[in-house]
Image (cartoon, grey):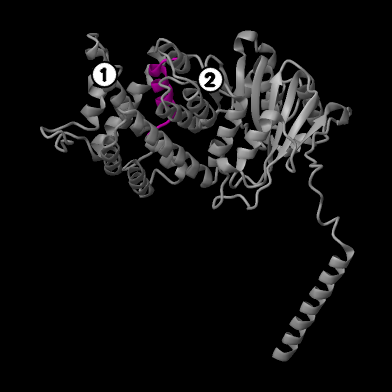
């Protein structure tokens, strides 16, 4: 039901003059979906309060509640279309009254860690782009049929929302910034292995995939007590995001996964001076995929001891500084980081190796990030002790990755298993720090267990192939002459 509803909504938005891309579809679906989710959440809390003999004060004022403006009911429990706003009347209400009302929650909320504040943030950062009030009415009618009151319903919705984010990434433009393949995220989380009570951070949060998967992982580690659930809701997940759309999608994604008031800040992480990060600002776990290939201005670079325009390298400095002593990280980065010879890259590798134990490097094949066209590695490290040896794993697959054949969890199963004991295999090996050049700290992936077949072919085999190709060429030339 959810999947078909999303498809129908996309068909409607495709016809609207205000929505031109998959990014617009996700953004516009998100704010309407959020208000329906909020309405169901309020009803659930009110029912729970009544069952325990308590009172519950609803967040949204009566005239702005879903059942008043979006879905007034008739005697049969269906939408009363005589009362439901549509056309220009609906647009006037949404743009002129609803959005301004919801924006004010940012100012009146008790703290940033409340759902009230998140309501204000979301509706301060976006606007209704749907230009036809009739299209908007159709979308509202479809979303009104969705239910978010059982765990099964919420789980299905969160799964489908993830699919929409993936489609947005596959659609190109800026969408790829928001989507890291979920099998890769799950694998990184498994290896980093967070515990209940850890503070988990992603300073390039995007669609919040790392935080959502960390939440899913922690929910399965043990039977959760009421205290555990409160810890997960309020004190575990933290993120920062610069771009408005990514920020909204990230918050929506976490809410659909069950975190009611995500601790995600809409801010430029790199605008923070590294010298200002204190112990209270540090985290137990950092999991992230900072943007590829971004370039930062000189004033942003001044916040970092190692000056570089490469966005990902600035983020890596930020993540190292943001980890507590003993803290663990899993960071995706371009594989050129391992071998670049410029001063910033060499200095950053030196910093990483001396201040952290870089215990694992996962070398990924091209095509993991659909459309990105870059090769990446994942760096796993712990802060507080220098690196003594590095375990490399090279993911070699028997197919080319891409939209048709994406990465899956089975592809990474051997890595997860071998990583536990740093096992040696045709795809994995250990490097001691004494083997690493102490001048340039080159960490390039050079698999000693795989021989280059082109360099080790038998000379007779090569001569036979040349002879065969000569014969094929002669045949082709004869065929051409006959045709002439």
Name the residue carrying label 2.
Answer: 238
Instruction: Give percent across and percent down for residue 90.
Output: 26, 35
Nearest the eye: 206 or 254: 254
* Quadrant location, the N terminus: top left
How many marks on residues? 2
Classify mark 1: helix, strand or loop: loop
What is the quadrant of residue 278 in the picture? top right
Instruction: Tell me which secondary structure the magenta stretch mostly adopts.
Output: helix
Compared to residue 327, the image places residue 418 above or below, namely: below
From the viewer's perspective, tell me whether residue 200 is left or right of residue 1.
right
Instruction: Give percent across and percent down for residue 268.
Output: 58, 24
From the viewer's perspective, tell me whether residue 66 is left or right of residue 456.
left
Name the residue carrying label 1.
Answer: 61
Is residue 116 magenta-colored? Answer: yes
Residue depicted at x 22% and y 9%: 53
What is the quadrant of residue 414 in the picture? top right
From the viewer's perspective, tell me whether residue 246 is left or right of residue 473.
left
Dot in front, 1 or 2: 2
| Residue 482 visible in the current orientation | yes
Nearest the eye: 258 or 74: 258
From the viewer's perspective, tell me whether residue 110 is left or right of residue 52.
right
| Residue 484 visible in the current orientation | no
- Comes first in the chain, label 1 or label 2: 1
Given the current orientation, which residue lies at the most extreme left position?
75
Compared to residue 338, the image places residue 21 above or below, namely: below
Instruction: Give percent across and percent down for residue 6.
Output: 36, 43
Graded by Cα atoms within 10 Å as few (under 14), some (14 to 19) or many (20 or more), the crowding at tag 2 reads many
Extent of the magenta region: 113-128
Instruction: Give percent across and percent down for residue 107.
Output: 41, 14
Residue depicted at x 22% and y 33%: 71
How many angstroms separate mark 1 from mark 2 (CA)? 29 Å
Compared to residue 247, the image places residue 20 above or below, namely: below
């Amino acid at each position: 039901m959810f999947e078909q509803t999303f498809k129908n909504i996309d068909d409607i938005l495709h016809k609207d003059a205000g929505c031109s891309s998959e990014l617009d579809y996700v953004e516009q679906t998100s704010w309407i979906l959020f208000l329906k989710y909020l309405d169901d959440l309020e009803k659930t809390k009110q029912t729970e309060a009544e069952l325990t003999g308590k009172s519950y004060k609803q967040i949204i004022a009566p005239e702005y509640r879903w059942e008043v403006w979006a879905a007034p009911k008739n005697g049969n429990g269906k939408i009363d279309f005589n009362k439901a706003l549509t056309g220009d009347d609906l647009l006037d209400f949404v743009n002129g009254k609803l959005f301004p009302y919801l924006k004010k929650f940012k100012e009146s909320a008790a703290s940033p860690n409340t759902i009230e504040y998140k309501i204000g943030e979301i509706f301060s950062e976006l606007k209704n782009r749907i230009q036809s009030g009739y299209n908007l009415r159709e979308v509202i009618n479809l979303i009104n049929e969705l239910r978010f009151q059982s765990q099964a319903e919420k789980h299905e919705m969160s799964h489908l929302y993830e699919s929409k984010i993936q489609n947005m990434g596959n659609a190109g433009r800026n969408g790829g910034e928001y989507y890291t393949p979920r099998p890769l995220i799950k694998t990184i989380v498994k290896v980093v292995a967070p515990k209940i009570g850890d503070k988990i951070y992603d300073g390039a949060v995007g669609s919040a995939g790392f935080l959502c998967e960390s939440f899913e992982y922690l929910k399965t580690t043990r039977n959760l007590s009421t205290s555990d659930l409160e810890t997960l809701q309020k004190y575990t997940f933290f993120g920062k995001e610069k771009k408005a759309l990514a920020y909204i999608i990230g918050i929506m994604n976490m809410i659909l996964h069950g975190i009611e008031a995500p601790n995600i800040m809409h801010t430029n992480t790199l605008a923070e001076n590294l010298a200002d990060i204190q112990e209270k600002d540090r985290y137990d776990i950092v999991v992230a995929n900072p943007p590829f290939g971004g370039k930062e201005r000189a004033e942003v670079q001044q916040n970092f001891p190692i000056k570089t325009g490469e966005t990902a390298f600035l983020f890596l400095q930020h993540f190292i500084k943001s980890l507590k002593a003993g803290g663990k990280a899993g960071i995706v980065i371009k594989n050129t980081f391992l071998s670049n010879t410029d001063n910033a890259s060499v200095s950053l590798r030196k910093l990483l190796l001396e201040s952290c134990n870089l215990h694992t490097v996962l070398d990924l094949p091209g095509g993991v990030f659909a459309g990105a066209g870059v090769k990446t590695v994942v760096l796993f490290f712990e802060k507080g002790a220098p690196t003594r040896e590095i375990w490399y794993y090279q993911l070699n697959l028997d197919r080319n990755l891409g939209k048709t054949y994406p990465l899956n969890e089975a592809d990474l199963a051997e890595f997860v298993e071998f990583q536990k004991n740093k096992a040696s295999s045709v795809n994995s090996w250990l490097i001691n720090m004494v083997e690493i050049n102490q001048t340039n700290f080159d960490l390039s992936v050079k698999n000693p267990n795989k021989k280059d077949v082109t360099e080790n072919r038998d000379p007779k085999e090569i001569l036979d192939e040349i002879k065969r190709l000569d014969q094929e060429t002669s045949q082709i030339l004869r065929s051409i002459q006959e045709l002439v």
